[in-house]
Image: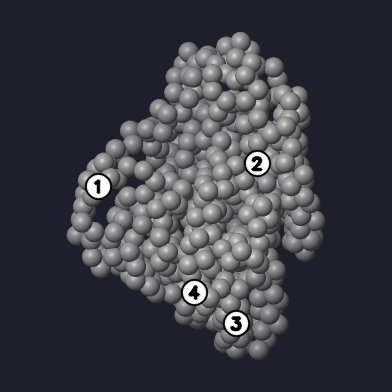
Amino acid sequence: MTTLADPLQGPLHSRSGPDTYWSTTNVGEAFPGVVTPLAWSLCGPGVEVGIRDCYARVGALPRAEVRVPDRVEDRLISVFYGRGALNVNFFCRMGANLPGSAPDAIARQFLGELPEGIPARSRSRRLPIVAVKMPYTQATIRSDVLRRAMPVKGWWQGWTPRLDTLDLAGCRDALTDARTTFTEMLRVQAAGLFVGVQPVFDRLNTLIDKAGLTAEQVNALVGGQGAHAETDMIHDLWALGRQEITLARFLADHGYHGPNEGEVSSTVWREDPAPVLRLAEQYASLDAHANPADGAVRRTRARQEAERLLIASLPPVERPVARIVLKLVVSRIPLRGVAKAAFLQALDVARGAARRMGVHLAEQGVLDDPEDVFYFTADELTRTPPTVAAAVAAERRAQHETFHALTLPTHWQGNPAPVEARVSRPARTDRTTVRGIGASGGRVEGTVRVLRDPEFADVEPGEVLVCGTTDPSWASVLFLSSALVVDVGGPLSHAAVVAREVGVPCVIGTGDGTTALFTGDRVRVDGNAGTVEILSRAEPVAAAERKGPSE
């Protein structure tokens, strides 16, 4: 461990070879900002191994390649100026090895074009292996995800009461255990999403195209799928607000959630339950007819009606297969949240172990501040830190702040050219509409609340929430809102899935909703058409008032 003689040296920046294409598209939800070194040391290798393992399970990748490559340009994910980016060449290579996948379409999704050197056609060399492995993997994926993920909640509940009592050696043991569990759950999550959810969702979209359903019917069809970890949280917040369960009971089940919970240095609800108490008060203020259980029943009925319409619109010969696909949709889409809850629980054990370790190291004079522990990697923390640890932490903290002041392009070749982040928002224009993807049906008018920090302190029931991306803790406040508008994401992103289950109109993938809209604007959100119509603008707010979690 050394000090940073080079301002770009350290665990939060990589240098790629010149021929590799990188993209931040589809990364924003997992890595919405600049990560800490501890977070990247857990997430980077975990995502790398998890996704590679998924492709190996279906035969698209040799099992020997399920590892973190030595060269940056050979990795499927890397970090540049503190932000994660995906290797487009790798994903196009995987697309070329899978039947029915178009590598040129993957490249255009990430880059908007097909650069020279990226395969445009599928390759047949691994197709026989895929033909053998993929059917079995797809047939067993649901039971596999549930079997491997379900024990983690009990494991998390066993660790968290002990974290504040651990000595330094115990902290290292807990961090090691959490790291192993976290990586394993990322394997499960990748398989559940890419093998279990995405193929079934693609088949459903094919049926929808044949059936000619309306946007409203489509949104009903992909909603009402049943229990999710996030919807369970909403039901329990409803019960907490009505004193049907205790705060201790709620935190024992959901305490790993909290603002920016995917970043290991964040403070979650089990550490600070104040946000939960405020949410419970807001839930308690709602009328009884807002009961989430009743809404879930209505959305299930709407889905079943949409299923009947879809089946009736197809030729009789195609209906048996369509019924199988619809059953798979109901059983598979909830898998998206199962392993995600499990890896967040594993990350929370790492959080608690690291935070306790920071206390010990500060007491020993190794660190100046206990929170500086998050500026070290997991490998560094499981070894004895050197006497220069405080200096390293100070330099990495400064680098972290520097990276916050930079923005990256959405895609690039080789290494990115960062630019200084815009300090002030663009001026209001005469623009009247923001467009995206209609991800959850319904039309509503409301007042905008732009959120740049997921603290939720300023959110009031009935507002239209506008944000860059979401994580599972957002479900708690989404239930209180009238609509959701998100810069980043698609129909299977977290925001879209939860909005459909909660019954809130959602427009996703706007790209610039957080800059085009302002807190106080009056808008009409159409979750079927994917539009946000600006009805009236709020009065301009003084610059000093714009600072903070919302604007």
Quarter of the rendering containing residue 534? bottom left
Q: In this view, does 27 lie to the left or right of 409?
A: right
Nearest to N terminus: mark 3 or mark 1 = 3
Q: How busy is the neighbourhood of tag 1: few (under 14 within 10 Å), some, or many (20 plus)?
A: few
Residue at the disc numbered 3: 301
Q: Distance between the residues labelled 2 and 3?
A: 36 Å
Marks 4 and 1, the one that precedes in the sequence: 4
The disc labelled 4 sits on which kind of residue? Asp
Q: Earlier in the sequence, mark 2 or mark 3?
A: 3
Label 2: few (<14), some or many (≥20) within 10 Å? many
Residue at which label 4 appears: 287
Task: Residue at 57% x, 80% y: name it.
Answer: 298
Residue positioned 66% across, 52% down in the render? 248
Q: Which amino acid does label 3 sit on?
A: Arg
Q: Point out the frontmost of discs 4 and 2.
A: 4
For residue 210, above or below residue 482: below
* Numbered disc in front, either 4 or 1: 4
Residue closest to the eye, 239 or 414? 239
| Lower position in the chain sequence, tag 4 or tag 2 | 4
Residue 468 position, x and y percent, is 42, 51
Q: Residue 347 carries which label?
A: 2
Tell me residue 58's x, y (percent): 73, 53
Q: In which quarter of the image is residue 150?
A: bottom right
* Residue count near mark 3 (Cα–Cα under 10 Å), binned few <14, some 14–19, many ≥20: some
- Residue drawn at the location 71% of the way across and 35% of the way down: 163
Q: What's the CA distance linking mark 4 and mark 3? A: 22 Å
Q: Mark 1 points at which residue?
A: 426
Asked if disc 4 and disc 3 are in contact, CB closer than 8 Å, the reply is no
